[in-house]
Amino acid sequence: MARVAIVTGGTRGIGEAISLALQEAGCTVAANYAGNAERAKAFTDRTGIATYRWDVSDHEACAEGVKQVEADLGPIDIVVNNAGITRDGVLAKMTYADWKDVIDTNLGGCFNMAQATFGGMVKRGWGRIVNIGSINGQAGQYGQVNYAAAKSGIHGFTKALAQEGAKKGVTVNAIAPGYIDTDMVAAVPQDVLAKIVAKIPVGRLGQANEIARAVAFLCSEDAGFVTGSTLSGNGGPHMY
Ligand code: CAA
């Protein structure tokens, strides 16, 4: 039977590519989104992938959202925690809301979604959780104490939860993308981005597909012995 997968932030950017890659791998996919209903509808029309709206930073909303997906599609086998936001700014200018929104969404979202799904995976003896980290969680980035802390937290969260799932058939891994050609990266000021791209040995931004196919592998049967790992896909500026 087809595995059921939830991809948070699954209608845009890297998440969209992941939803499509999992669909191509034979999964039944539920793509979660937070705000852009128009884009979500267009996504469903184009792909046939069902979309579900909830805010991953809201613990209750995640539990409710997962319940709805399970009622519609069946027990959840795979969760890709991709939903993420940026609120860049140097520490002196960063508001407490900028800090909290990014921590609650990017890192809190992983906790909320795992709590809603991990127990069922353990009970059924099979599961895959893939968390989308970032090069900026590994290396830090000027103007991103919030985002770097959240993404770095994701890498620790992954290794800790992997230990809880290991004996139960549930793997937990992370991918750390570098600068990928998405709306999020397009929002970086052009002059700043040009300097960042100049330091990427591969000489270009990454493509969402290049991350999505790696996620699909980590979600596959073949990846059963890979757990607690962080796979970097960043074009070479930080080899970690
Ligand atoms: N290291 C050291 N100094 C730096 C620096 C760096 N990397 N970047 C800028 N500075 C310096 C500048 O030279 C400048 O110095 P002077 O005042 O002496 O001239 C000073 O810091 C202020 O720089 P800005 O004018 O850029 O400051 P700002 O307040 O206008 O903007 C910022 C700050 C919003 C953080 C802006 O620099 C920015 O957007 N940076 C990009 C951050 C980034 O890479 N975000 C990634 C988003 S995508 C993503 O996160 C996906 C992923 O996972 C990879």
Image: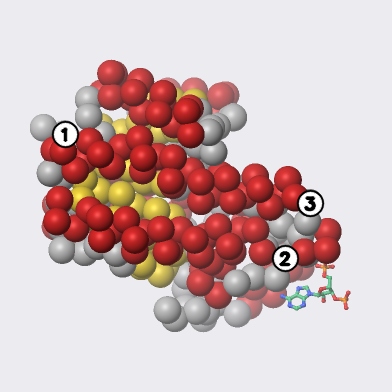
User: Is residue 175 positioned above or below 165 on the image?
Assistant: below
Name which residue type carries label 2.
Answer: Gly
Q: Position of residue 240 (x, y in %)?
A: 42, 79
Q: Which residue is mark 3?
A: 95
Q: Earlier in the sequence, mark 2 or mark 3?
A: 3
Within 10 Å of the Cα at label 3, are there few (<14), some (14-19), or many (20+) other Cα atoms?
Answer: few
Label 1 and label 3: CA atoms lie apart by 44 Å
Q: Secondary structure at mark 3?
A: loop
- How many residues crowd mark 1 within 10 Å: few (<14), some (14–19), many (20+)? few
Q: What residue is disc 2 on? A: 143
Q: Residues within 10 Å of mark 2 (few under 14, many from 20)?
A: some
Residue hosting label 1: 2
Q: Is residue 34 above or below residue 157?
A: above
Q: Residue at x 56, y 24 (%)?
A: 37
Left or right of residue 94: residue 156: left
Give the side of residue 78 with respect to residue 39, left or right: left
Q: Residue 21, image x and y in percent?
A: 31, 46
Q: 150 or 34, which lies in front? A: 150
Q: CA distance from mark 1 to mark 2?
A: 42 Å
In three-dimensional space, the C-alpha distance between marks 2 and 3, rounded to whole angstroms, equals 12 Å
- Of badges 1 and 2, nearer the viewer stands 2
Whichever of callouts 1 and 3 sits on the residue coming sooner in the sequence is 1
